[in-house]
Image: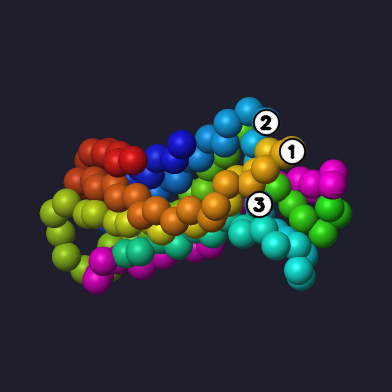
Amino acid sequence: DSKLTLRSLGDNRFMATLSIEVLEGWHAYDTVGAGAGYTPLKVQFVLPTGVVLDGPTTRPDSFLYAKDPSVTIFEGRFQFEQAIKRTGGSGALEIKCKLSYQVCDERMCMPPTKKTLKAAAKSNQTTAAH
């Protein structure tokens, strides 16, 4: 499951938080070695005109996959956070986040998945979308 929220920090700054939960016994891939055949989790924030990224995306820690030392994985609940800044415009702000990933358990892998999440906020409000 995944959810994107957008929270106002004041002064035309906002924090976007992508929360992801991978079911127990399953994992998503962070980095994969050449020829590993897995699809790593990829997060891309899509911002409207007049809004820019304000620093790098804060990423969760991943760890080595016991079955393949060239691979790192995510398990359980984890978050990506991205500070953003409005450089022009006013009113409600809506952003999107493109997410692509593949999850596997010890026996099988699901096909790679892509989805787009949306979140909006006013300067003093937080909203979320799935």
Numbered range of the magenta stretch = 48-67
Residue 124 sits in quarter: top left
Q: Are marks 1 and 2 in contact (CB under 8 Å)?
A: yes
Between 126 and 65, which is closer to the camera in this rendering? 65
Residue behind mark 1: 106
Q: Amino acid at mark 3?
A: Tyr
Identify the secondary structure beneath mark 1: loop
Between 94 and 28, which is closer to the camera in this rendering? 28
Between 123 and 36, which is closer to the camera in this rendering? 36
Disc 1 or disc 2, which is closer to the eye? 1
Q: Residues within 10 Å of mark 2 (few under 14, many from 20)?
A: few
The Cα–Cα distance between marks 3 and 2, rounded to whole angstroms, is 14 Å
- Residue 18, image x, y percentages: 45, 45
Residue behind mark 3: 29
**Lower sequence index among marks 1 and 3:** 3
Q: Residues within 10 Å of mark 3 (few under 14, many from 20)?
A: many
